[in-house]
Image: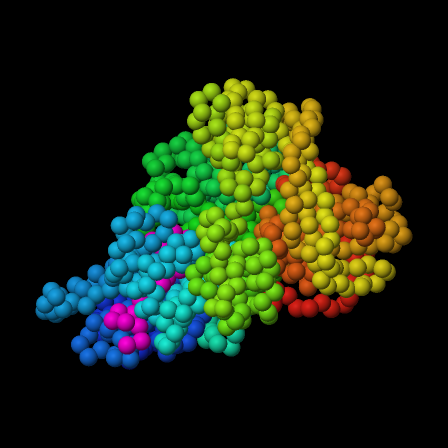
Amino acid sequence: MESIGARDGRLIHLERTPARPGRHGHWPAWADADLVAAYARLGVTRPWTHQEEAADAVHRGHHTVLATGTGSGKSLAAWLPALSDVLDAQRPGGSSARISSYGRRPTTLYLSPTKALAADQAAALERLVGELEALQREAGAPAGSVRTVRTGTCDGDTSMPERDWARAHADVVLTNPDFLHFSLLPGHERWNRFLRCLRYVVIDECHAYRGVLGAHVALVVRRLLRLVRRLRPDGPGPVVLCASATAAEPALTAARLIGVEKSAVVTVTDDGAPAGERTLALWQPALREPWATWQDSGPSGPGGSVAVGTPQGAAGPDSGDPTEDPSARRSAVIEAAELLVDLMSVGARALVFVRSRRSAEVVAERARHSLGLSAPELVPAVGAYRGGYLPEERRALERDLRRGALRALATTNALELGIDVTGLDAVLIAGWPGTRVSLGQQAGRAGRAGSRGVAVLIASDNPLDSYLVHHPEDVFAAPEATVFDPANPYVLAPHLCAAASESPLRAEDLALFGLRDESLLEDLAARGALRRRPAGWFWNTGLPGRAQDLTSLRGDGPPDVPVVEAATGTVIGTVDGAAAGSTVHEGAVYVHQGRSYVVDALTDEAAVVTERRAVGYRTRAREHTSVRVIAERDRQQWADGVTWSFGSVEVTSQVVGYMKQALPGMEVISQHPLDMPEHVLPTAAVWWTVPVEVTEAAGLTPADLPGALHAAEHASIGMLPLLATCDRWDIGGLSTAVHPQTMVPTVFVHDAQAGGAGFAERGFRAGREWLTATLAVIEGCGCAAGCPSCVQSPKCGNNNEPLDKAGAATLLRLLLAAAPGTQPAVGGGPVDR
């Protein structure tokens, strides 16, 4: 791979990290002897130094965050104190203090961001408990005196009998924040035994909780801790262990999640685990030849089976969709599939990380197709892993990967988090995963358990990827901080309602939820959601539904829209509700498993489609967007009349029509109007203005200005993820030569979530660094007039028109000349208010 890439210029940079020996600690004196012996039977003779330090801090009652590398055994730091306490409570003459404080058997709640990780931890616990019981029996312990730990998993896949058993008997419950929010907390009366005895809360992979999801999870955790303290007013509250990848400011992340001061969290970051030599290659696909426009769509050609239920024209950042400019680079997804075939051909085992469910299927199908021609015996050893599979299918894939029955797996980031997969030789990452933290997690899947490993980051065709592969110093810089804002009122308000339904809100709860006073509670009461009584604020039970149903933790927005075949009434797929207007509007072309359909109608209930054997065109929606400034929260006055602002805005968008584009060249053959409803998003934005006389003095005529502003907007959206822990699909933007409120040329970049997610604010506080990187990617791109690697956007509602690459560079140089010489340091997120 190295020789091939170096020969044709695709291998841009190679970074080698030398092997590192491990540093052993000692088993703490309080650790249960039988548990220590059980670990020894599994090959863990002594803990690593970071495991000992974190476990001891947790056992002493300190909230702790353990932030070390992939495969460093962070789970031992949680299970050693948790299981030792459970076993101690069963020992004659065990710790009376612990028994009186927590009930006969103290309990532990484990929270995982994914079901796959929870299932993996459950399997590891079962092995450990099995060894624990076996060694006691071998030592002659009577059947009735064998001490054990009862574990249970509760999530959306768990049957009701299994949930009932966990509520009644489990010492350790493994779940996720969604189950905690929607089921456990609203039904806490049935969980009374477990919650009254709750000693430990383990929040695994806590760096994964960022943006709106991070704010939601922080408030769910705070509701849990508040409820336990209310149920056990005289006893100590639960101790929280947060396990994280190596990230900036892990103590701040943990403190925000649980609602305490940063100083109240013990931080453990010195990784004592051994690591094998790691090699990370930065790889940029070659430019495609014009004749190969359709070939990158997969083995079935244009509109082939690789579409996996994605509407035509709805290309993602790594989709390999044949609507891409023929002069653009080859798709990162197709490049990954071909590299995977090369790796498998020499006996390697590998994971391929992609950015979408569709891309996982594309990689697997493309690899199987190529192997079928060269090594058909390897075809069954390739699989895809993504959301939408049945639970038993996911567990079978995980099991086959561990056992080696699968030698290659294309996956979304579901396998990024913590699953113990050893023996992998390589990891291919198709497209920048969004953050350096995620890059480290994904690359760390190769060469686990101290062995050597290689990872390849394959740049997709967008500005950030192009910039990063040519600026390795930014790829290997310090990891980012996790950004989320629990004070976002659009997130906080429904959680206050949920908390009030679980137990009345009182004055002592205000600080936990970041409230300075009762004004937000009074506003919710005025809206009829809460009722004030002498005992506190109560949920209005006269309202329909549950308070917990007011919000979705994953920020899913409108529900998925089913796609129904008109002739049979069969549901053939679903599309994201938020994108339905632009993807399955009347007249849109929709492709599902190789079949082409045309949408007859889009209703509130479904998109009705009819299959067409030969559709010689694609469709692309045209969208109109406007931004209204609601409140300017912060402003910097730069030189030459340039302003740099941050504040609250309303973004109004409407699909106004669509184009038919002929295959394969994508020429526009007709345009059609649509009358679709408007959608209003209240959010946060960063924006800049520049006087028109300044742009004219820089050589930009009024005719040049719209294209220059538009290109600068696209490029800056593409580059913001360099500084903020976000994806370009988490943000949006607008540029206009005359904004009705500012009355001058203005560019907005806004968060795509209601109330904001902290990304625009991060951009505001790092303006010079952001603009410098944006200019660098434009000036460093070798295209003549603009391409997806610099100023074109895959999600532009105006079909990337007009765009002026040279004008954008002029504007950015103008802005940088006007900007202050120093800016606040990048690294902090929104401050809890």
**Residue 496 locus on image (x, y percent):** 51, 60
Residue 130 falls left or right of residue 791: left
Residue 243: image quadrant is bottom left
Looking at the picture, tell me which residue is in the foreground, 139 or 335: 139
Residue 825 falls left or right of residue 260: right
- Residue appearing at x 19%, y 68% in the figure: 147
- Residue appearing at x 62%, y 29% in the figure: 619
Does residue 513 appear in the picture of this structure?
yes
Residue 255 part of the magenta-drawn span = no
**Residue 538 locus on image (x, y percent):** 48, 61
Looking at the picture, tell me which residue is in the foreground, 463 or 188: 188
**Residue 403 locus on image (x, y percent):** 30, 49
Residue 824: image quadrant is bottom right
Q: Quadrant of the C terminus?
A: bottom right
- Residue appearing at x 40%, y 70% in the figure: 230
Q: Give the residue furthest to the front.
A: 534
- Residue appearing at x 71%, y 39% in the figure: 624
Looking at the picture, tell me which residue is in the foreground, 786 or 135: 135
Magenta stretch: give its range.
100-119
**Residue 201 locus on image (x, y percent):** 38, 66
Looking at the picture, tell me which residue is in the foreground, 590 or 128: 590
Does residue 331 appear in the picture of this structure?
no
